[in-house]
Amino acid sequence: MKKKLSLLVIFFSALFVSAQDEDIKKVSDESCSCISEISLNIEKTEANEKIKSCISTAILSNQIKGDLLGQIRKSVDVSTLSKENDSIVDEDNKDITIIVDKNYDEIEEYLLRNCEKLKILIASDNKEFDNSYSTNKKALKLYDEGVTFFKERNYKKVAPKFKKALKEDKKFGFAWDNLGMCQRQLRDYKEAIKSYNESLNLDPSGRMPLMNIPVVYEYLKDYDKAIKAYKRFSDIYPKDPEGHYG
């Protein structure tokens, strides 16, 4: 009898885990769609806030559309909910608990593995310096066209736009950064390193190229150069855990 009960416990536990995994995937995919709309040309802090907002909104939306759909009879302003558990009352005076951070860590982990735009946003850090932007109108127009294709993940169309922008202005820092990112996505790793180094020639403390160069060396399986590049990054940004993690 005990053996049968144990098997039943295992069976229902497996069902629960499977349903939870499916829930995490569903919310993560919705979050990733939202994250894909975030501009590459914003400060890191603002990008992080937008990423968190995308994840939290997807978590709430999933609960409202799922378990709570049959109980809620009027619209709910989710922006008024606290960062922890909150509750609302429907017309029948039934308490409905909404877990604002339900499976948040698992969803974030799934996104880090599977959401390409999130990886790009984390690797990007368009902190402005003197040569970040160009004063050349043609270069800016070409760059903006490239960013549009970048959002669509059409990397084969992105690279020529950034290259043309750089022909107009070789000191266009963001164009070098994002060309390198694009070349990385196309697995043109050696060219990506060249682009990142061009950016570093303009700003030796550029966080984005400093953090991406060791990653590209890892893809090339040149671990000695990757270690040196991570140490260089850590020397300039000693409080950033990415260097130590790498």
Image: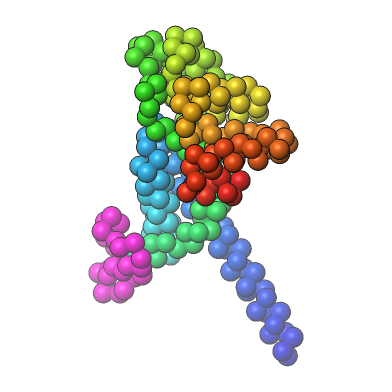
The answer to whether residue 91 is magenta is yes
Identify which residue, 45 or 150, lies in the foreground: 45
Residue ranking furthest to the front: 235
The correct choice, above or below, for 200 with respect to 215 in the image is: above
The quarter holding residue 44 reads top left
Q: Residue at x 38, y 62 (%)?
A: 100
Label tally: 0
Judge left or right: residue 59 versus residue 155. Answer: left
Q: Tell me which segment is drawn in magenta.
A: 73-97
x, y (%) of residue 63?
41, 60
Examine the rendering and report whether any part of residue 147 can be seen. Answer: no
Q: Residue at x 36, y 11 (%)?
A: 136
Determine whether, in the image, residue 125 is placed left or right of residue 137: right
Location of the N terminus (image quadrant): bottom right
Give yes or no for residue 17 being in the magenta stretch. Answer: no
Task: State whether residue 10 is above or below residue 156.
Answer: below
Q: Nearer the viewer, residue 97 or 132?
A: 132
Residue 134 spot, x, y in % from top left: 37, 17
- Asked which quadrant contains residue 95, the reply is bottom left
Can residue 67 be seen here? The reply is yes
Most prominent secondary structure in the magenta stretch? loop
* Image coordinates for residue 202, horizontal then vertical, percent: 46, 22
Q: Residue at x 39, y 33 (%)?
A: 127
Residue at (60, 22) in percent of width and height: 194
Relative side of 72 to 143, left or right: left
**Residue 181 rendering spot, x and y as whole percentages:** 55, 29
